[in-house]
Amino acid sequence: MKKFLMTKFNSPEWNKVDRDNIYFWFVSLGFKQVGDLMSVRVFDLLNLDRINNNRAEEMLLCLYHLLYPNAKLDEGIYYDEIDQYFSYREWKKKHKRLEQATVSDVLLTEGINESALLRIFDGITTAFYKSSEYNSRKYRYGSFKELLDYRISVEKEGGNGQTK
């Protein structure tokens, strides 16, 4: 796991899973390695400049393929050769407040597969677009640094460091 978290977005390990040059979006927003992204709330990821629903999904899928490089399970599920049930309801019971779900909460879920990841992400994005954190005209953060600065300022004020 530590090796996974230390993977840089310009490394050969990353290039094996990044078919669409998604690394550009990570680097341009100020992320240097995978570990930088794991503690970010999915709502905050969707509030980063130039990251829309589709781009965030592509980013999570790249992280998923880095963490779980064996694609045979996902291919088997896709072609109905393997039946691996994943209960979104059970996941949602554990994570009652979807606005608090982090990237690691999604990717490190026990029994996760690609279709389950997409189902979880769809549920979170639906909640995001219905929330007060969504503004169709403006992103909250221009970069990862701005997000970190915001969290630090809120912590100093006695908050929990997460967007209100």
Image: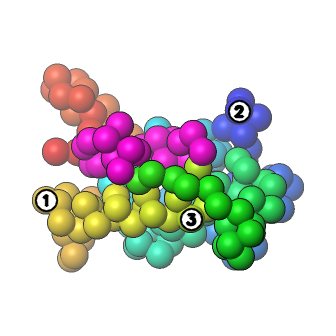
Q: Position of residue 108 (x, y in %)?
A: 57, 41
Of callouts 2 and 3, the N-terminal one: 2
Residue that mark 3 sits on: 115
**Mark linked to residue 55:** none
User: From mark 2 to mark 1, how far is it between C-alphas?
Assistant: 34 Å
The residue under the point 79% across, 54% down is: 69
**Numbered range of the magenta stretch:** 89-111
In the picture of the structure, the residue carrying the numbered disc 2 is: 1
Residue neighbourhood size for the residue with mark 2, other residues' Cα within 10 Å, grouped as few (<14), some (14–19), many (≥20): few
**Distance Cα–Cα, label 1 vs label 3:** 28 Å
The CA span between labels 2 and 3 is 22 Å
Is residue 21 located in the magenta-colored stretch of the structure?
no
Q: Report if residue 35 is visible in the image.
A: yes
**Where residue 32 sits in the image (x, y, percent)?**
63, 47
- Crowding at label 1, few (<14), some or many (≥20) Cα neighbours within 10 Å? few
Label 2–label 1 contact, CB within 8 A? no
